[in-house]
Amino acid sequence: MVNIGIVGVGTVGESVVQILEENRDIITARAGKEIKIIRGVVRDLGKVRNVNIPLTTNYKEVTRDPEVDIVVELMGGVSGAYEVVRDALLHGKSVVTANKALLAYHRFELQQIARNPFEYEASVGGGIPIIKALREGLSANHILEIKGIINGTCNYILTEMEQGVDFEKALKTAQQKGYAEADPKFDISGKDAGHKLLILASIAYNIDVKPEEILIEGIEKLTPADFQFARQFGYKIKLLAIARRVGDEVELRVHPTLIPSNKLLSQVDGVMNAISVVGDRVGETLYYGAGAGGNPTASAVISDIIEIARGTSTPMLGYKRPLEIGNFRLRPIEEIETSYYIRLVVRDKLGILAQIGEIFSRNSISIKSLIQTAQGEQVELFLSTHRCTERAVRHSLAQLSTTDFILRPPYSIRIEEE
Amino acid sequence: MVNIGIVGVGTVGESVVQILEENRDIITARAGKEIKIIRGVVRDLGKVRNVNIPLTTNYKEVTRDPEVDIVVELMGGVSGAYEVVRDALLHGKSVVTANKALLAYHRFELQQIARNPFEYEASVGGGIPIIKALREGLSANHILEIKGIINGTCNYILTEMEQGVDFEKALKTAQQKGYAEADPKFDISGKDAGHKLLILASIAYNIDVKPEEILIEGIEKLTPADFQFARQFGYKIKLLAIARRVGDEVELRVHPTLIPSNKLLSQVDGVMNAISVVGDRVGETLYYGAGAGGNPTASAVISDIIEIARGTSTPMLGYKRPLEIGNFRLRPIEEIETSYYIRLVVRDKLGILAQIGEIFSRNSISIKSLIQTAQGEQVELFLSTHRCTERAVRHSLAQLSTTDFILRPPYSIRIEEE
């Protein structure tokens, strides 16, 4: 018998309880033991819940109960969850969490104090077993690159916008369908994807950085015109979370990205998630599935519980011994190199194209393609560049912003050709 | 230190030796131990090999060497490999194999005698960690369906044929590029995919059947006309390996399949593999990558070695206890229900369409769409049907074959709409 204490009994928690009950046959056969949830911790005992387990408001009745073997943390948030998980680990419990924010900030501290199994499959990609794939399935490989669509809210909105819907309307539809929170900021700003990216990067590169240190841009500034440009040049626009090894540095970034529309990642629509992982030996592999929702997330949580029950847990970040090599440094944001799409709204005046060209060339940026559309007094310019540094683009756009012919703040989207 | 004996040192074996050497840093950190190949077993000591390990022709110097911890079987074939693997297990070794034919025939016997870890990630989908995903990642789920493109040779040929190339020419190109064997029969007949399907089905359904018991059809009879029909109706043609739960029965089948061209599986081109798995809780997940080749296959083999070295191996078919429920029976081939595309070549004569319609309706098959093209004296008919049984289609086609107006044997392709 394995006894579970569950902290946070919301949508995912309810699904965990339900699946453990309804799929008991197969779960017991796979785990080799009966799995029983003996207590749940909630904030509000008065709230009606769809589960039949004893509840408490005091997490220590779970983290310090000698009967409890595994603490499942599903409360979300950073500091409160850290307190609970830390207490559980210090009291010798195994831990399963779905909490990406907790791990984005505290994964290396938690790894240090975890003497027992610590699993977190549900923290990235919902029901997709991406942690297992990266940490165990590809363990023979040096990871060259990870590119993920790992925020379903953003992907839903971008899929709508592809059909010509504008951002505000797409967001509203997403909220009506329950795909976006009432306060959607955390998702659409790219932060949620950033947290998940850091978890994947820790497994691939053993790199300990905080969300604030990496490049994160959201999808709020995209317009239907950007999607038109994308279509015209054979691209789709996706919010990608990218980790890439460049020498002994690692690029980590989350931003809207133009990707060729014949790539498999381009075909991932709606709330679905997908992660492409390139290993030095296996080449590209890709993992696709539901990135959120009660049942898919609970599916991952329970796979972790089974792993622990059966005694086959992998070390938290996949390293049984401290990694001697691979002391990767984070590549400074301004040194990231890629190609760019740039949208400019300028006054319709003679000689402006020359001035724009002059600013780009002064910053060593070479233009690859250009589309110009006039609307009354103003001209919209859509440019794409050859590879250049983030620094060069930032300088160029800053210089453009101070000219007298720029009518709106310049906007750029990075391109990933490969 | 973990000592490996490797039986069969061909392309994959050489890659295993090479990767263990070149990625030693990361592999040791993940395994927690040094991994050393101490002996290789080959048939011909005279052959030049790209590896620097002691070689022997006697497999017992590996399976019975007290120094050897893990026997890696890469020799292929059924009976010889069975003898080696059995001997290794009986002498207390852990086993890693990439041998799908061995497992297609002997997986349940091997499971019974395996007292130590037995891993086989490379046996299906090459470098894609599909065994791990299905056996561990989705362990909370009852598996509803598996649909896989798991033979790269066939997928390469079908991708070529989509461009209008005929079968013979596509096969020749595949052979020139090293994607097809000199004797390609095993791949293009669907047998290889059938073997792999049985492995996946055993994990999902614990079902013990032999390749001869399931429906397996190859791609040899496809013509450019079939691809034209497919395109016209929004389909692609893929060789799919399908396992599907229908009540307490499981359908197992491998055959060319028409699938809607907007599905992710349709986008999997060339030698790449992909497997879609639907769980009752997680919904659809999909896994994509290189299904063959020395390095991708070796990547999977080494991930198994690491798993064993670190002591985190999962029970062979994923069940720690005998599965009490889920005594699935194989659905008899003739009872499989799906919709069909049927190609008929008939004499151009009055009243023939009525006769054909009569034969189908007598077998309760309802026609969904029909295209007719005349070429001189003969007419080609392309029909698609609504759902019906395999039995009904077989009877209809047998009856059509005996008519005086049929000029060539009728040909049918199953359709998977979902």
Image (cartoon, coloured by chain):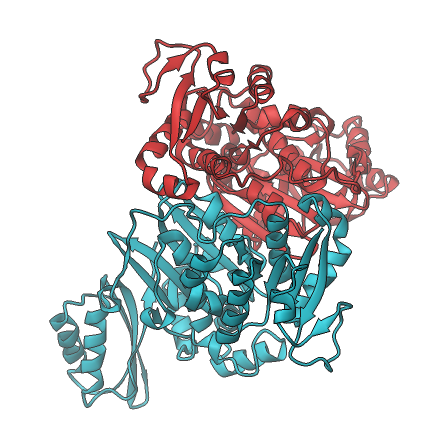
Chain colours: A red, B cyan
Residue B44, image quadrant: bottom right
The answer to whether B132 is drawn above or below residue B251 in the figure is above
Residue B411 lies left or right of residue B274; in this view the side is: left
- Evaluate whether residue B293 shows in this view: no
Image coordinates of residue A394 in percent, x first then y, are 78, 33
**What residue is rendered at 41% in x and 64% in y?**
B240
Image coordinates of residue B25 in percent, x first then y, are 76, 48
**What residue is rendered at 30% in x and 53% in y?**
B245
The answer to whether A258 is drawn above or below residue B226 in the figure is above
The answer to whether A188 is drawn above or below residue B260 in the figure is above
The total number of labels drawn is 0
**What residue is rendered at 55% in x and 69% in y?**
B84
For the C terminus of chain B, the image quarter is bottom left
Image coordinates of residue A395 in percent, x first then y, are 82, 32
Single out the residue that lies furthest toward the right.
A362
Image coordinates of residue A349 in percent, x first then y, are 75, 35
Residue A377 lies left or right of residue B343; in this view the side is: right
- Evaluate whether residue A85 shows in this view: yes
For the residue pair A98 and B163, the one nearer the viewer reads as: A98
Residue A50, image quadrant: top left
For the residue pair A27 and A127, the one nearer the viewer reads as: A27
Residue A255 lies left or right of residue A294; in this view the side is: right
For the residue pair A271 and A339, the one nearer the viewer reads as: A271
